[in-house]
Image: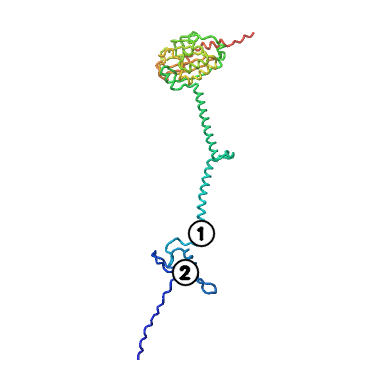
Amino acid sequence: MTTPPRPPRKRRRTSPRPQEHPAPTTAGPAVRPVPPGPRERTTQGGPRERRPAQEELWERSSQGGTWEGSPQAGPRVQHPAQAGGQERRATATRERRPARQRERRAQAETDDWNVSWLGARGLSRRQQKLVVYGGSAAGLVLALAAFMFVVSMIGSDYVPEQDATSAVGTQPRPDSYQGWVSSKVFAPIARRADNSKPLTLKEVFGEKTLKEGRITLKLTDSALDTGCSTAVWGQALAQRLTQAGCLQAARGLYVSADGRYVAQYTLFNLRDVASADALTTSLKTLHRGGWPLALNPEAFPAGGYTEGSGHAMGHYAGLVWIGRADGAEPTAQDDFISLALTVRGAEKGVFRRVVTATPTSAPTS
């Protein structure tokens, strides 16, 4: 006898456990499952104590990421106390930043205009600027005044190049000049008051021929002017001669025996040795705008090369003017030094006056 089979046991359906964190109904990005972790903590010698869900929520949010049931959007969850502290710090930083910038700008402006010795006297930054700018302007004015003074002093003896050029177009002048003051040899005739006898043509140009070495000069023309301004060209030179008390101007023109050279000698009779020294020195620049007139204009062609020199001898001033007859510049064969020494032979009359004015000692018995 067989036993009948038992009917199958019916499974009892159990209702699903309600979820503590229901899933959000809104669509959003895929979420990852809740990381495993104990939701319960054990106490010593007692049953497990269940942790509050909110405390676990803060702990998991601090670890980052999302979990099932967590919000899907919005900023990272922070502890209220922590969020409040960060907000206060950010507000304080924003408040301090403009103040620091203002302090830096004020410090930079103060450094730029912080003159120690002016600040020590209680001057503000604006007052320091006025002092600095005013001092700079005053210094510039003083420098300009000093420059104009120097120019005016130089200009007393200097003739502008434009005037000299226009004069050269009508009157010849030396291209170079050298001047010498009087020596002690001429001390006996230092003043015209002690040597009042007027000059004569015979005394200065009495010798018709002057010879020195290989150069021989022959006198071709001579003149003695009582008005010195009529013997020169150039207003500045004429005025200087008037100031020097010039009474006579003796001129003599020479030509070399071979016709290669020309030379003119001019002797001025001035007030004293100081006037003669001043004239020969001033002609270092004054000769560009004034010089003795040539007795024969054709002897010194305009634009030709010539040289000049001045020699003070007591209250006399002698001017030498030499050059080639063709106006060309000197070559190695042209000895202008010997030529100048030769024409200075006309100074023999001055040396005779020195001898005459020199007192002779009485003979001893």
When the figure is inspected, residue 77 is found, relative to residue 322, above or below; the finding is: below
Q: Nearer the viewer, residue 52 or 304?
A: 52
Residue 124 x/y as whole percent: 56, 40
The crowd level at tag 1 (other Cα within 10 Å; few <14, some 14-19, many 20+) is few
Residue matched to label 1: 84
Residue matched to label 2: 37
Q: Tell me which label, 1 or 2, sits earlier in the chain.
A: 2
Q: Secondary structure at mark 1?
A: helix
Labels 1, 2: front one: 1
Q: Please indicate, yes or no, whether residue 12 appears anywhere in the rendered image.
A: yes
- Quadrant for residue 186, please give it: top right
Marking on residue 169: none
Residue 248 x/y as whole percent: 50, 11
Q: Amino acid at mark 2?
A: Gly
Residue 318 x/y as whole percent: 50, 15
Residue found at the very far front of the displayed protein: 25
Q: Nearer the viewer, residue 360 or 275?
A: 275
Residue at the spot 50% in from the left edge and 54% down from the top edge: 91
Residue at the spot 43% in from the left edge and 73% down from the top edge: 18
Q: Nearer the viewer, residue 361 or 7?
A: 7
- Quadrant for residue 69, please give it: bottom left
In the image, is 118 to the left or to the right of 9?
Answer: right
Residue found at the very far right of the displayed protein: 365
